[in-house]
Amino acid sequence: MYKLKVLVVDDSLVYRRIITRAVEKTNIAVVDCTASGGITALERLEQRDIDVVLLDVFMPQMDGIETLKEIKKRYSHIPVIMISSGGVDGAKITVEALRQGAMDFILKPSNGDAEYNMDIINRHLNLLFSQILIDKYIGTGKPVPRPNASLAPLSSPKTRELPQKPTTLCGVDVVVMASSTGGPNAVEEVCKALGSNFSKPILLVQHMPPDFTRIFADFLAKRTKIQVKEAQEGDRVIGGRMLIAPGGYHMIVNADFSISLTDDAPVNGVKPAADVLFKSVAKAYSGKRVLAVILTGMGSDGTEGLKILKRSCQCYSITQSEESSVIYGMPRSVDEAGLSDERLDLKDIGRRIIEISRGRC
């Protein structure tokens, strides 16, 4: 059975060993080689046939961003997963790395429980490596390997045919969006397309840990023409502004259109969760016009909440196409549930949001 060949790049020998163990525990991949810095990493890539790079954010001489840029320039086909130490500085650089083409990131262990740390990293790598295997084999005519029976099937199931004549929505009261892996770039592209005149409120759940969502909000505010902020307790849902659910909290819309943040347990393994937001929007906006946009990401977060939105509101849903998604998990879940009214390439989603919001149904 073919296993992905991984290059682990970290200046710490301890972390190289931890990450190596986590990679090999997936049973989907094997660490082909390691490097203690960016220059050595580039030498390894020149000498070896590597499928995935795990790249530390902070390194001496040639840091993670510089190394990432060189990898994407020379080996654009190789997915790069950043290894982030978290914190404000780590979050800033990691968000920039995602913008520069990194597929996703994993967080370095932050407590002393080695087995717990290993399980957290292992679960995330399992999902990412599974998707990389799918991308590597689909279209080659070779059977897609199924390395671990506990994982979701490593195939690309056919989605249900969507209705020939989807429900229409003329005008919008609120836009809700959900994204995960690949989401930062996707959200940025959508927001840039909206421009400065977009006047509807937008509520976003992007799966990210604490600190990262605030950095991401600041990043979007500087690079797009819409108002963007990380949501805080008591914020109001107002037109022309995007509120991003903060990492580590669920975001809820109350009946008076104020925001509450809750520290309840993760839903679908994530916090914030789109399902939590969508269900609260279904109550607050009962009978009103809701446009739901499901972008690239792993898992199925958003599907259950969208079912409730469809029952309670005039809800129209757009899913990002498989071809333009980094990970087609969340959009695929909505498509397969028969809940998507329209599948679009990423480049067309912003334009379509404007059309619907202006009543061009």
Image (cartoon, rainbow, N blue to C red):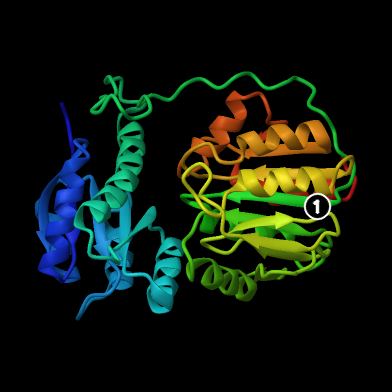
Looking at the image, residue 250 lies above or below residue 287: below
Horizontally, residue 228 falls left or right of residue 107, namely right
Q: Nearest the camera: 267 or 159?
A: 267
The image quarter in which residue 360 lies: top right
Mark 1 burial class by Cα count in 10 Å: few <14, some 14-19, many 20+: many
- Residue 303: where, in percent of width, then height? 62, 35
User: Residue at point 66% right, 67% down?
Assistant: 231
The amino acid type, in three-letter code, at marker 1 is Val
Is residue 347 in view from this perspective? Answer: no
The image quarter in which residue 69 lies: bottom left
Looking at the image, residue 34 lies above or below residue 317: below
Mark 1 highlights which residue? Answer: 174
Q: Nearest the camera: 118 or 301?
A: 118
User: Residue at point 34% right, 32% down?
Assistant: 134
Which type of secondary structure does the marked residue at label 1 adopt? strand
Number of marks in picture: 1
Looking at the image, residue 38 lies above or below residue 317: below
Which image quarter is the N terminus in?
top left
User: Residue at point 69% right, 39% down?
Assistant: 318
Is residue 259 in view from this perspective? Answer: yes
Q: Nearest the camera: 43 or 86?
A: 86
Looking at the image, residue 119 lies above or below residue 56: above
Horizontally, residue 146 falls left or right of residue 198, namely left
- Residue 203: where, in percent of width, then height? 70, 56
Which image quarter is the C terminus in?
top right
- Residue 94: where, in percent of width, then height? 40, 67
User: Residue at point 83% right, 63% down?
Assistant: 239
- Residue 27: where, in percent of width, then height? 19, 36
Horizontally, residue 180 falls left or right of residue 305, namely left
